[in-house]
Amino acid sequence: MNITQAERAADLCGWGELAIDKTFYLNPRWLTYVDSDARGRGTYWGAYADGSLVAGVSSHNPLSLMSRAYNFNALFDVDTSHRSPPALLGGRQGYLSGFIRNQRFPSDVVESALAKLLRAIETATPERDCWWPYLLFEDAESVLRASLLHGSIRRPRVRLARADCVIDLAGSSVEDHVEALPTANRRSHYRREAARFDRSPLRVEELRLSESWRDLAPLLANVQRKYGDHSPSEVYADSLARQAAMLDEDAVVFGCFLADRLVAFSLFYKTAGELSFRGVGFDYEALPGVGEYARLAVHAPLEFCYQRGIPRLNLGVSSYEAKVRRGARIRPLWSLLPPWAEHIPQSVDLANARLGSMATSEAVRIEKVVGDQWRRLSMTTIDT
C-alpha cells in the first residue's frame, strides 16, 4: 500500500469521487475554501492499493487562533503552553470531522490503510500530537481500531464532544415526512407552523450565492452580533465572497423576501447524499415573526431534498429540542484526544441544560445512545 500526501485534497486522485456521498465537509472544494483563510496549513494524505484510493485523511497545523470549537485549549479549558499545539485531523470547520473510506474495500483493509496514514502523519510531525474534534461513532470506532494495528499510533482518549441533528427523509414528499413524525402533537405543530408562514406576506426563493453574497453579509452580521460576535461586517462579507468564488456550484441559498426586500436567508451546501446547514441571516426589525427560522432552516431545505432526491438533511449542532420536534434525530459526536489527555473530563453531557427542555422520553433515549456508544468505544481503547 502506497502513502501519498498533497497540499490539496483535489490533488489526491479519487478523493473527490469518494467524498460525493459523504459529508460536504470532506468535499475538496470545501477544504480548499477552508485553507484559504490562512488559519491553518492543510496536508492531505491518501493510502492507495492497486491505483485506488483506500482511505484519506486531512491534517491541519494551526497557524493562528482558531474558533473556540477547534481551539484545543479553549474547548477543553487546558493550558498546553509547554507543548506544541496539537494538529487537527479530519477537518477544522463544520462541526463534523471524518476521513475518506472506499466502500469497495473490506473494513479491515480500510482500517489497515487508515493505520498506515496515521503512522505517516505522526512520523511527519513528531513535535505535535494529533486529535480528532468531532467524529461520528462509526468513524471514531474505525480510528480506534486502526490505532491498535501494527503499532500505528498511541491510542487516543475518547471524549464526548457534542451532537448534531439530521433528518433522514421518509417516503417521497414533505407530507410523508410529517406523517412519519411520532406524535400527533408534532404533526399538527409542523402543519400549523407551515400554514402560518404561508399566510404571511413573505416568500422564499432560491438564490445563487455568487449573485447574492453582498446582500447576505449584513444579515449574517446581525445574527453573529446577537450571539456575541462583534466582528466588522467586512469579515462576514469576505467569508461569503470567498465561498461564492469557490463553492457557488455547491451552495443553496434560500432567500426570504418582504415585497422586493431581502429580510432573511439560509445557506446550505449539497452533496449527492446530504444537504448541510451552514448559517442564517436576519433583518430582525423587518421580520413579522411568522416562523421565519423554521421555514428557512427546515421546511424549505426539506422540500429541496425531496425535489432533488437527497436522502438526508443535516441541521448541524445545538437547538436540539427544536430540531427533534421537527423530525430530526440526534447523533453524538466524539473527540479523540492525545494519550496525555486522560485528565481532561467529559466536556459535554448531552443530558445537561442544553437538552433540559426535551421530553423525558427523548432525553432517556439519547442518554442510552450515548451510553451504548461510549461502552463500545471503551472496548477498543484503554480509556475506560
Image (cartoon, grey):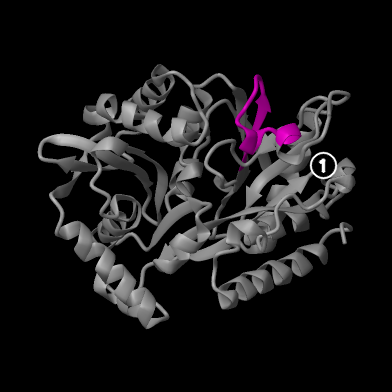
Please state which of residues 201 and 51 is positioned toward the viewer in this rendering.
Answer: 201
Relative side of 374 to 285, left or right: right
Looking at the image, the residue that sits furthest to the left is 259
Please report the residue visible at 39 percent of the width from the left and 66 percent of the height from the top: 326
64 is within the stretch colored magenta: yes
Mark 1: amino acid: Pro
Residue 121 position in % (x across, y down): 74, 35
The residue stretch that appears in magenta: 57-74
Q: Residues within 10 Å of mark 1 (few under 14, many from 20)?
A: some
Relative side of 324 to 79, left or right: left
Relative side of 302 to 117, left or right: left
Label 1 sits on residue? 338
Residue 254 position in % (x across, y down): 26, 44
Relative side of 276 to 75, left or right: left
| Quadrant location, the C terminus | bottom right
In the image, is residue 220 above or below residue 200?
above
Q: Quadrant of residue 233?
A: top left
Please report the residue visible at 20 percent of the width from the left and 35 percent of the height from the top: 262
Say which element carries label 1: loop
Residue 118 position in % (x across, y down): 74, 42
Residue 382 position in % (x across, y down): 89, 58
The tally of labels here is 1
Please state which of residues 127 and 259 is positioned toward the viewer in this rendering.
Answer: 259
In the image, is residue 214 above or below residue 344?
above
Please state which of residues 141 and 148 is positioned toward the viewer in this rendering.
Answer: 141
88 is within the stretch colored magenta: no
Please report the residue visible at 86 percent of the width from the left and 43 percent of the height from the top: 341
| Quadrant location, the N terminus | top right
Q: Would residue 283 be visible to someone looking at this image?
A: no
Q: Would residue 196 be visible to someone looking at this image?
A: yes
Please report the residue visible at 53 percent of the width from the left and 52 percent of the height from the top: 318
Q: Quadrant of residue 238?
A: top left
